[in-house]
């Protein structure tokens, strides 16, 4: 439904020149390849300045990519301009962090605006807008002005407005970043509902793992203009493949060994130390008493330093940081045992034994 092929974007900074007198440039996106199938909710996560907004703005050509092609709903947007591009954009709705409502228009008139611009007759506009206000839970607020609404209500108006032209795709640029956690949850529930009821494909960008966890099917990680990792959300939370992915996850789970222990970790295993491991397990492994079996079958004692259970979509995910205590042979055997039982095992380092 959304396909980016080899998309790069270079901004030229006006009035700024480098030592050779050439205009200064920033390469905000580098060779992005990307596909979101119809009906999916796809998240793009990254730190501030990574290129998230540029990426999402390239999807509806609010920014024109410097190179590469963008295809939405089977239509190559990068080949279009003028009225043909405007027409194609009706198939793509967008919402923003700061809602971007017109303050001098009522809720109804804000939602009606894109339809007025399309030249739709008044009666048809009313027929379209009324059910949309019901869908977002604001049918009693039609004649109020944005200033009378809470942040969550304003975002609901923006969602109704984005849906007015019956798009197939909804783009969300940090749509919940200005909202408190409870309101965030209610807006995410609404987006999930819309995805489900209307079959809308949603591309959302965020810097918050909570957003990815609670609504996305799949996630891409962007760093310095490049897509560095992509995975189904359950897999990403179980075993991120990049350093940045692990940083995001650890930051979100707040599951890290105590600082004092990190400082004492050694890289190489030896007779005088024990491995400290991060274990992630989902599905069946959660309910199996693996840890006690480890002690029995591998003669290894397990000291649990931290543990957490998270529910991610329909999956239960267990996470643990533990020290495995035994001889090098036995701890090696224990690691093999864990891996053969579908646990994701990461050795964080080795700590001096004090027995
Ligand atoms: N209109 C612009 N002109 C020049 N540089 C820009 C413009 N928009 C974004 N940038 C730069 O591109 C990079 C990526 O920005 P952005 O896409 O906004 O990142 P994010 O949304 O992840 O914070 C940053 O270095 C930013 O300063
Ligand atoms: Mg941004």
Image (cartoon, helix red, strand yellow):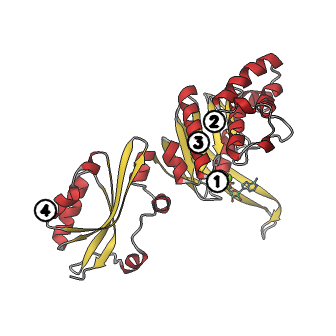
Distance between the alpha carbons at the discs numbered 2 and 1: 19 Å
Distance between the alpha carbons at the discs numbered 4 and 2: 53 Å
Q: Is residue 296 left or right of residue 276?
A: left
Distance between the alpha carbons at the discs numbered 1 and 3: 27 Å
Residue 101 vs residue 73, the one in the foreground: 101
**Residue 51 circle label:** 1
- The numbered mark, 1 or 3, whose residue comes first in the sequence reads 1
Distance from mark 1 CB to nearest ligand 1 atom below 8 Å: yes
Distance between the alpha carbons at the discs numbered 4 and 3: 47 Å
Residue 265 vs residue 31, the one in the foreground: 265
Q: Which residue is mark 2?
A: 170
Q: Nearer the viewer, mark 2 or mark 3?
A: 3
Q: Which residue is mark 4?
A: 296
Q: Residue furthest front?
A: 140
- The quarter in which the N terminus is drawn is top right
**Residue 186 circle label:** 3
Which residue sits at x=52%, y=53%? Answer: 209
């Amino acid at each position: 439904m959304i396909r980016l092929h080899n998309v790069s974007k270079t901004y030229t900074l006006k009035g700024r020149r480098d030592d050779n007198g050439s205009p200064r440039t920033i390469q905000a996106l580098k060779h992005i390849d990307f596909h979101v199938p119809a009906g999916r909710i796809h998240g793009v996560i990254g730190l501030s300045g990574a290129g998230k907004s540029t990426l999402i703005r390239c999807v509806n050509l609010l920014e024109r990519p410097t190179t590469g092609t963008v295809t939405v709903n089977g239509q190559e947007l990068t080949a279009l301009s003028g009225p043909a591009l405007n027409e194609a954009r009706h198939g793509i709705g967008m919402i923003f962090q700061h809602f971007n409502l017109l303050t001098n228009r009522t809720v109804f008139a804000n939602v009606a605006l894109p339809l007025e611009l399309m030249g739709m007759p008044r009666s048809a506009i009313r027929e379209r807008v009324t059910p949309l206000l019901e869908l977002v839970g604001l049918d009693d607020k039609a004649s109020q002005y944005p200033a009378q609404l809470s942040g969550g209500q304003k975002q609901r108006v923006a969602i109704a407005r984005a849906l007015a032209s019956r798009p197939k795709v909804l783009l969300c640029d940090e749509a919940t970043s200005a909202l408190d956690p409870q309101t965030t949850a209610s807006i995410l529930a609404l987006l999930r509902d819309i995805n489900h009821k209307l079959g809308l494909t949603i591309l959302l960008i965020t810097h918050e793992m909570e957003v990815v966890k609670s609504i996305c099917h799949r996630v891409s990680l962007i760093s310095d203009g490049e897509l560095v990792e992509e995975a189904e959300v359950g897999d990403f939370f179980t075993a991120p493949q990049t350093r940045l992915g692990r940083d995001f996850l650890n930051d979100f789970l707040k599951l890290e060994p105590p600082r004092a222990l990190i400082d004492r970790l050694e890289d190489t295993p030896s007779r005088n130390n024990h491995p400290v491991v991060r274990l992630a397990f989902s599905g069946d492994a959660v309910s199996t008493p693996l840890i006690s079996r480890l002690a029995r079958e591998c003669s290894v004692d397990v000291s649990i330093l931290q543990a957490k259970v998270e529910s991610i979509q329909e999956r239960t995910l267990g996470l643990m940081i533990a020290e495995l205590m035994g001889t090098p042979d036995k701890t090696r055997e224990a690691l093999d045992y864990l891996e053969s039982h579908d646990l994701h095992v990461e050795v964080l380092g080795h700590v001096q034994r004090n027995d």
